Image: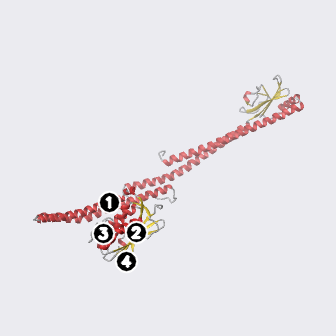
Amino acid sequence: MLKRTPVRLAATFTALFATTVIALFAILFFGITARLTDQIKLRTEETMQALQAVDQQKGFDALAAVVTGESGSVRDSDFIVELLDERGHHIAGNVNGIKTSDSWIELERSAIEADWDNGEPDDRFQALWQPVSQGRLLVGSSNRELRQTQTFLLEVLGIGLLATTLLGGLCGAFIAARTQHRIDAFANTLSAVSEGRIGARVPLSGSGDDIDHVAGQVNHTLDHLQKLIESVNQSSSDIAHDLKKPVGRLRQRLDITSRSAKTTADFKSAIEEALGDLDAMMETFDALLRITQIEAGARRARFASIDLGAVLDDVADTYTAVAEDAGHQLVAGNARAKPAIVKGDRELLLQLFANLIENSIRHCPAGTRIALALYDEGDGYRAEITDNGPGIPELEREKVFRRLYRLERARSTPGSGLGLTLVQAIAELHDAHIALGDHAPGLRVAISFPSIAAA
């Protein structure tokens, strides 16, 4: 248990609370002690001044009579007094043999010769010698009131310290238990993921505190991990399915050539066709590797401030002639008052928009109008590529981003089914959101980029 962080934190805070109570009590204890000591001395000085006034007004004999009367009538063991003549002989008082001094002295009851035996052995007296007309006078007061107050404060400290320790321990144990429960939730979730239950997530408490924030980040990471794993699994299946046919055709062609080709020209033709098939497969693998690198985020190190509008202008300039050669019309509507600055990789952004335009050119019939536009959305920018071609059925719009997935009508056209997968990977790398919609007729592709400030 002592190795658990919440338990250690609870013990640390309990010790901190107890130390704080002791420190505050020490300040209070010594402050009250000093204040009461000053009051004892003040009371002693006031008594001394009253007796000195008797000496000044009525003489030394009257003072001796008053001291004798006070000593004989004293019922309070907290008061001591002694009068000496000029030769240091004891004249009157309830104590005897006290050594004279010019400053305050502290006397223990056990160290003085008193004329009474009442009082407590632990009593201590604050006493002061002062000169009078024919000798010296001693007046002292006991610190019993101070000791009683100190005893009371120590009892209060014991009770308060015990209560603070118990309360701190209970609160610490409660907090530790709650914190440990939430830490266990992280451990259990990660353990479940390591055992293959990739859908496990850390439960959120709903408090919105820092642990919930970390839990949200962990869940976001697990979502991304699950998506990657599912993508890899799907890609493996798609690769096996899509490459099985071309590899089979390649083997069949080579087998037929090896058995039936008679001339060098026949062998050369078969080899050229085989090389073409191999090149197509190599392009597919290169595209898959490129997508994997982009999804891993390795290209973020090359990010810089990019004018998204300038990127769209370059793409439009490049593909206007290409679209015209294919019998299409490419229109760029990019009227903007200021640059659309985003953080990104210019080469990848060019690839993203080039893939989308090439898709429209390749899969739309002649005469299709393709439009490229950029809009300011306040906290970001939205780029749109629209066409009035056949579009993509709503049920297929999520599937087309899968690796090697192709619509049934597109299987007769060149391509590997990785173009939109690459587009999505580049968009996610730039924290952009891509959505496919209906242009009625045709397809609308909207990509929302955060501005630098929003990012």
Report if residue 395 is visible in the image.
yes
Q: CA distance from mark 1 to mark 3?
A: 19 Å
Q: Is tag 3's residue or tag 4's residue first in the polypeptide sequence?
A: 3
Q: Amino acid at mark 2?
A: Ala
Q: Is residue 422 above or below residue 74?
A: below
Rendered location of residue 361, percent (x, y): 32, 72
Q: Is residue 368 above or below residue 352?
A: below
Residue placed under numbered mark 1 in the picture: 290
Secondary structure under tag 3 reads loop
Q: Amino acid at mark 1?
A: Arg
Which mark is nearer the camera, 3 or 4?
Answer: 4
Q: Is residue 139 left or right of residue 286?
A: right
Residue placed under numbered mark 4 in the picture: 441
Residue placed under numbered mark 2 in the picture: 435
Indicate which disc residue 253 carries.
none
- Disc 1, disc 3: CB below 8 Å? no
Q: Name the residue rendered at 77%, 37% in the picture.
A: 42
